[in-house]
Image (cartoon, grey):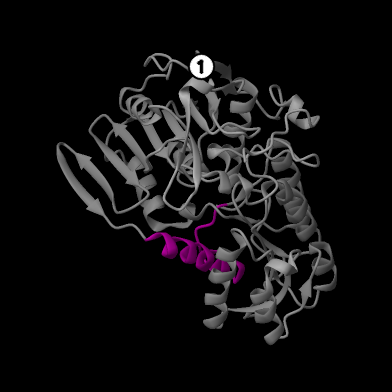
Amino acid sequence: MTNSKTSPFSQRPHAPVRVGLVGVTGYGSAYFEALTRLVDLGRVAWGAVTIINPKDTVEQIAFFQERNVPIFGDYLEMLEEGQELIDWVCIPTGIGWHTQMVVESLARGYQVTVEKPLAPTLQDVATIQAAEKRSGIGISVGFQYAYQQETWDIKERLLSGEIGKVERIDCLALWPRMRSYYARNKWSGRLHDGRSWILDSPLHNALCHLINLILFWSGKERGKEADIVRLQAEAYRSKPIESYDTVRSVATMDSGIEAAVVLSHSTCQRYDPEIRIRGEKGEIFWRFIGDYEVEVDGVRRSYPKLDQISVRDHMFDNVLDRIEGKSARICTSDLARGTVKWVNTVHDTAEIQEIPPAYRKAVCDEAGEVVDTVCDLEYFALRSFYERKSFQELGAPWAVEPSVADTSDYEAFLGRFCADAQRGKAARKLAK
């Protein structure tokens, strides 16, 4: 469960573990809440915090000042001056900062937890893993479902042959995202921010947990994920962003399993994530909300799953257990790499297709929030999920034939269809 060339710690910290948090807004607020719980339990102590937007974080600054916790305006200052203050660094920042912050933290001997996805590109993953090897410290990645007992229970059921040989995996998630979602920071919807690749998309941000689970469950060994050897992809854009907001991809694994995934932020209706694993003797159903189910020989049974808040807390409990030298389930860089490969391959395989205006519609809710949608996308997405067909095969008027790539030797992101973004020529302004 750890990177094969590292251990989870170079020198085990004494309890309570002192934490340094990089950012307290955006998803950083979730880390703040989770770590505050651990502080209240006496397992963690606040060591330091980096806050770069003081005008927007008056309450958070007051919180740390009341507790005499050092506040830094730059993460490098925190890492340098925090040598006697910090054991563990948590990085819930934008995708483009992950690589640099992880590497800088490892170079100073800190334990590291970085939010998902691990990094923008496979080259970045290689850089992180080289830093792990140099430091002797294995990082943890915020794919929170990878830490859950039910995730590992499903893997055991598959390896034991409970549903027979796995024939296929199907996944669907339709999460509408408003214009305000893309306006919340400077990197949302971006391919490149002028400094780093981002490759933000449903596949590489909000819904990448699903890819991480599919790769893990498709792996031939208990603690390993599968490798993609072939990928079919089609990607579409209906919003005023650089990246895509709707994607269908079909991955063939080295384990022989084929997984078809349909994701979108451009529907009117929400359809929470669902993964169906079909075997010769039965099926396993995993859903974002509620229990997971196993059906064998026509008999279906339910098994409990943690709620969303408990899932996050359980992840931090496992990470802290591992830092303290205890046995724990951890999402390592090895178990997070495949998601990056999947994302990179989509971008290097399928050119993003602009949905024609005739098939787009801006919808405004009661709160005045606007979401740019694709007409009848729910219909085509659900049919694609159940019938396992491409959007073009189903007759979507805006669809193109999917592109296919052999990925067995794919080791580095090429930016094949993203060159304009890297040069700054594809930047788009959100519609007003």
| 423 up-or-down from 64: above or below | above
Q: Which residue lies under the disc numbered 1?
A: 402
| 82 up-or-down from 176: above or below | below
Amino acid tagged 1 = Pro
Is 315 within the magenta? Answer: yes
How many other residues sit within 10 Å of disc 1, few (<14), some (14-19) or many (≥20)?
many
Please state if 331 lies on the left or on the right of 154 as rendered: right
Q: Quadrant of residue 322?
A: bottom right
Residue lying at 39% horizontally and 36% vertically, measured from the top left: 172
Q: Considering the whole magenta stretch, tell me its main secondary structure.
A: helix
Residue lying at 37% horizontally and 25% vertically, measured from the top left: 380
State the image coordinates of residue 97 (x, y, percent, origin top left): 73, 50
State the image coordinates of residue 332 (x, y, percent, origin top left): 59, 51
State the image coordinates of residue 246 (x, y, percent, origin top left): 50, 31
**Residue 77 visible in rendering:** yes
Please state if 218 lies on the left or on the right of 350 as rendered: left
Please state if 140 lies on the left or on the right of 220 as rendered: right
In this rendered view, identify the residue nearer to me: 295 or 386.
386
Q: Quadrant of residue 220?
A: top left
Q: Secondary structure at mark 1?
A: loop
Residue lying at 55% horizontally and 52% vertically, measured from the top left: 1
User: What range of the chain is rendered magenta?
Assistant: 307-331
In this rendered view, identify the residue nearer to me: 208 or 380.
380
Q: How many numbered circles does the render carry?
A: 1
State the image coordinates of residue 325 (x, y, percent, origin top left): 59, 69
Which corner quadrant holds the C terminus? top right
